[in-house]
């Protein structure tokens, strides 16, 4: 019989597919800590543990890898990310709870849990990468068990994750200065598959870390195309580049709130041509107006109506650019587009920072840049030299 966790009825529909919810590393660590403390103080063995998440969903989680000593108990809860593409899915999150002589409960990370080495993250430098909400979840769970069994002595909780160091290499942790393992995360205790808010939070964390470590100007690409172009064609500090995915508007909003002085975006035109129409989420499901934006700006640049109609019937931006080049209007069209990109970027920021963009395509290479792009490149290079 399949074990029921309590999440069986929780899912979302995305692209006509039912996608399961899961639970966070924070939930696993807290549930394992609760089970270990209960076994330590009661002497009984526990194979399932009820755990109420901050989201209000009551889970019933399996407890494994139980190991008992005279003054400690260790056990694990396996992470289930549901249908979210999570690098920590399937990892066992261990908690070792040990009696101590001090009348307090202390929490730390062991092997496989990362340690903070740079400023600007939620935890101070030197601390285990166990975020604030999971910390409170773990400590409250163990405090509740102590109260239940009238235990007034001290307890030490060590969270560890076998395989965590290897898994962390596929996460943002190395870029953020978290070394040696994964982070114990989660604000609701529940993983919602393909969550936009979780991705935007990741961008915010990386940005805050850069700002706290002295970056006044940011180099941003939507994704891998931009990173590859930066590496091969631009004399800019690639290691300082951060990705914003489709969230151009949210990236600007967060930068404004953190006092960032400027952002240079480096992007494939397939993404950023949408910004020329004021579209600040460039995902195709939000807006796919590439041909329309290219055609309208080509008309502004003087292209004929029949040629504009051809552009509207293209499938890729490179195909559209080839038509515009055939008509001898590529440079003029790109100028129209970059001027509008600049306008909408600054409009989003209420002119509270300097913003620029460099756009390229796979077939044509460099296409053009906005008015402030050159100045931002110089400022980014100066910042890189100062940081060194």
Image: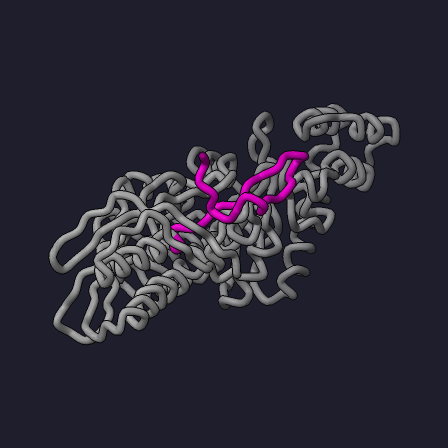
Query: What is the quadrant of residue 152 in the picture?
Result: bottom left
- Magenta residues (range): 1-27
Q: Is residue 62 left or right of residue 365?
A: left
Magenta region includes residue 306: no
* Quadrant in which the N terminus is drawn: top left
**Residue nearest the observer in this picture, 330 or 195:** 195
Going 30% across and 57% down the picture, which residue do you hit? Answer: 33
Going 71% across and 51% down the picture, which residue do you hit? Answer: 278
Q: Position of residue 18 (x, y in %)?
A: 62, 37
Query: What is the quadrant of residue 294 in the picture?
Result: top right
Q: Is residue 42 left or right of residue 19?
A: left
Going 69% across and 29% down the picture, which residue do you hit? Answer: 321
Position of 243 relative to 352 (above/below): above
Mark yes or no: residue 217 visible. no
Q: Position of residue 287 (x, y in %)?
A: 72, 42
Position of 223 relative to 326 (above/below): below
Magenta region includes residue 12: yes
Q: Is residue 318 left or right of residue 298?
A: left
**Residue nearest the observer in this picture, 309 or 211:** 211
* Quadrant in which the C terminus is drawn: bottom left
Mark yes or no: residue 110 visible. yes
Q: Total number of numbered labels? A: 0
In the displayed orientation, state which residue is furthest to the right: 305
**Residue nearest the observer in this picture, 143 or 224:** 143
Q: Position of residue 94 (x, y in %)?
A: 27, 49
Q: Position of residue 368 (x, y in %)?
A: 61, 40
Going 43% across and 42% down the picture, which residue do you hit? Answer: 80
Position of 155 relative to 333 (above/below): below
Q: What is the basis of the colouring in this image? A: one colour
């Amino acid at each position: 019989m399949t074990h029921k966790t309590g999440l069986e009825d929780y899912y979302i529909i995305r692209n006509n597919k039912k996608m399961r919810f899961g639970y966070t590393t924070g939930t696993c660590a807290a549930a394992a800590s609760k089970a270990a403390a209960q076994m330590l103080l009661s002497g009984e063995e526990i194979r399932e543990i009820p755990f109420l998440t901050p989201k209000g969903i009551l889970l019933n989680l399996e407890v494994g890898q139980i190991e008992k000593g005279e003054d400690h108990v260790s056990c694990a809860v396996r992470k289930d990310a549901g249908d979210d593409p999570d690098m920590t899915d399937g990892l066992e999150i261990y908690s070792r709870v040990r009696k101590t002589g001090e009348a307090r409960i202390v929490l730390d990370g062991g092997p496989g849990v990362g340690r903070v080495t740079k400023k600007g993250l939620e935890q101070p430098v030197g601390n285990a990468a166990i975020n604030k909400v999971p910390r409170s979840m773990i400590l409250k769970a163990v405090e509740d068990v102590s109260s239940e069994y009238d235990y007034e002595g001290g307890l030490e909780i060590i969270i560890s994750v076998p395989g965590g160091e290897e898994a962390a290499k596929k996460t943002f942790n190395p870029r953020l200065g978290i070394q040696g393992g994964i982070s114990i995360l989660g604000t609701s205790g529940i993983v919602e598959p393909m969550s936009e808010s979780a991705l935007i939070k990741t961008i915010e964390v990386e940005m805050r870390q850069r700002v706290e470590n002295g970056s006044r100007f940011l180099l941003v690409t939507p994704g891998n195309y931009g990173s590859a172009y930066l590496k091969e064609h631009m004399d800019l500090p690639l290691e300082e580049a951060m990705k914003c995915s489709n969230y151009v508007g949210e990236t600007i909003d967060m930068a404004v709130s953190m006092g960032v002085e400027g952002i240079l975006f480096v992007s494939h035109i397939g993404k950023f041509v949408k910004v020329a129409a004021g579209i600040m989420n460039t995902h195709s499901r939000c807006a796919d107006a590439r041909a329309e934006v290219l055609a309208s700006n080509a008309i502004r640049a003087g292209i004929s109506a029949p040629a504009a109609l051809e552009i509207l019937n293209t499938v890729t931006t490179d195909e559209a650019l080839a038509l515009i080049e055939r008509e001898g209007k590529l440079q003029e069209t790109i100028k129209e587009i970059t001027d509008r990109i600049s306008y909408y970027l600054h409009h989003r920021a209420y002119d509270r920072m300097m913003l620029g963009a460099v756009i390229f395509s796979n077939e044509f290479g460099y296409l053009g840049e906005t008015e402030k792009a050159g100045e931002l490149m110089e400022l980014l290079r100066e910042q890189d030299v100062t940081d060194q």
